[in-house]
Image: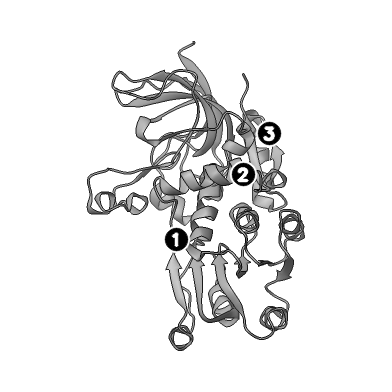
């Protein structure tokens, strides 16, 4: 094993400004493991950092190796690590919680106030190697292909949102057909939703993908959406809404199409405050939930069960693969929206 590795480094506080560099392989502490990355994939957060938008400018410190979605093999274990060994096939929870705060100690580590996120607050997986705390490591099923194992972080967002809605037998509307929304379509089908309505905007590529992974009906948010949903549900509305879009119009529309006593489950993040009719929410008795990350580690075990079941149709969502050297091209494809997940298979 050499002492250096190839990595995509966000080198400057400016748009793009990501360079493929040779950098030292990280050394591991007593409770950490070093992972040789097999496949990494791009999250929407990585695009925000690449574009250097207002959020990235406020949060990110450069230089930084991005990337928090990955699968790989343990190369080294720290002296204090138990239960893991060299050669284990793994992924990892990207949120590193402090383990000592009120939220962590009451079972809510996914909203730890001192969280450090791989590829955001510390170097990540767009490299040949990365180090993570052993407590964050998830050992993958040996039959799970690496290109699907790398999708578990965003899949966890979809699974947490969907399980929060208790979808079996229900009519579910999904706003936002980016990769997580597409995964939610597949998860709803795998978990026995009665009917899945996938709602996009103008991206025909992703609306077709939604149909491929199991949506019963695909609708456009800008073309008579409320009337169409009411026609499809005999005027009752949908039982549950899963909101992944972050669109300003999504919450008002969700409130219009959800039935009385239904639920709205929101993972999407908004660029600015959103206005909607809170009185309508109250008089309809609608419950609204904020969803963040994944439950640590309940959601990971639920994902494992779904992946082993063979009922989860994820393969069509992985649409593009690039070598790490083509980082800029991969980001351009991701930014175009004409894709599902975009992955970097690593050499070796």
Q: Nearer the viewer, residue 327 or 200?
A: 200
Q: Position of residue 273 (x, y in %)?
A: 45, 72
Q: Looking at the image, is mark 2 or mark 3 earlier in the sequence?
A: 2
- The answer to which quarter of the image holds residue 278 is bottom left
Q: Total number of numbered labels?
A: 3
Tell me the quadrant of the picture where the C terminus can be found: top right
Q: Is residue 67 visible?
A: no
Number of the front mark, 1 or 2: 2
Q: Looking at the image, is mark 1 or mark 3 earlier in the sequence?
A: 1
Image marks 1 and 3: residues in contact by CB distance under 8 Å: no
- The secondary structure type at the circle numbered 1 is loop
- The secondary structure type at the circle numbered 2 is helix
Q: Position of residue 134 (x, y in %)?
A: 37, 30
- Image side of residue 100 versus residue 47, left or right: left
Q: Nearer the viewer, residue 92 or 303?
A: 303
Q: Position of residue 89 (x, y in %)?
A: 52, 26
Q: Which residue is under mark 2?
A: 309
Q: Which residue is under mark 1?
A: 291
Residue shown at 72% from the left, 78% from the top: 232
Image marks 2 and 3: residues in contact by CB distance under 8 Å: no
Q: Which residue is under mark 3?
A: 322
Q: Is residue 300 visible?
A: yes
């Amino acid at each position: 094993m050499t002492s250096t590795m190839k990595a995509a480094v966000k080198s400057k506080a400016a748009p793009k400004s990501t360079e493929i560099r040779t950098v030292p392989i990280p050394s591991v502490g007593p409770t950490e493991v070093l992972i040789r990355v097999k496949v990494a994939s791009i999250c929407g957060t990585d695009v925000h950092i690449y574009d250097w938008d207002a959020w990235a400018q406020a949060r990110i410190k450069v230089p930084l190796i991005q990337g928090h979605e990955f699968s790989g093999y343990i190369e080294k274990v720290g002296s204090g690590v138990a239960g893991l060994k060299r050669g284990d096939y793994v992924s990892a929870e990207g949120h590193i919680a402090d383990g000592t705060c009120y939220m962590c100690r009451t079972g809510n580590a996914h909203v730890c106030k001192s969280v450090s996120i791989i590829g955001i607050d510390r170097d990540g997986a767009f490299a040949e190697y990365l180090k993570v705390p052993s407590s964050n490591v998830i050992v993958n099923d040996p039959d799970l292909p690496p290109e699907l194992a790398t999708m578990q972080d965003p899949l966890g967002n979809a699974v947490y949102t969907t399980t929060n809605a208790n979808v079996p037998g229900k009519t579910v509307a999904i706003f936002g057909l980016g990769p997580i929304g597409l995964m939610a379509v597949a998860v709803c089908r795998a978990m026995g939703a009665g009917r899945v309505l996938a709602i996009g905007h103008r991206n025909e590529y992703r609306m077709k993908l939604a149909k491929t992974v199991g949506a019963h009906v695909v609708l456009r948010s800008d073309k008579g959406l409320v009337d169409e949903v009411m026609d499809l549900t005999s005027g009752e509305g949908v039982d549950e809404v899963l909101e992944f879009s972050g669109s300003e119009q999504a919450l008002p529309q969700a409130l219009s199409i959800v039935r009385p006593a239904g639920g709205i489950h929101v993972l999407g993040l908004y660029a600015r405050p959103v206005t909607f009719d809170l009185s309508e929410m109250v008089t309809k008795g609608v419950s609204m939930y904020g969803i963040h990350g994944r439950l640590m580690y309940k959601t990971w075990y639920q994902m494992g069960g779904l992946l082993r079941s063979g009922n989860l149709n994820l393969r069509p969502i992985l649409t593009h693969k690039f070598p790490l050297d083509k980082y800029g091209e991969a980001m351009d494809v991701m930014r175009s929206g004409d894709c599902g997940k975009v992955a970097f298979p690593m050499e070796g």
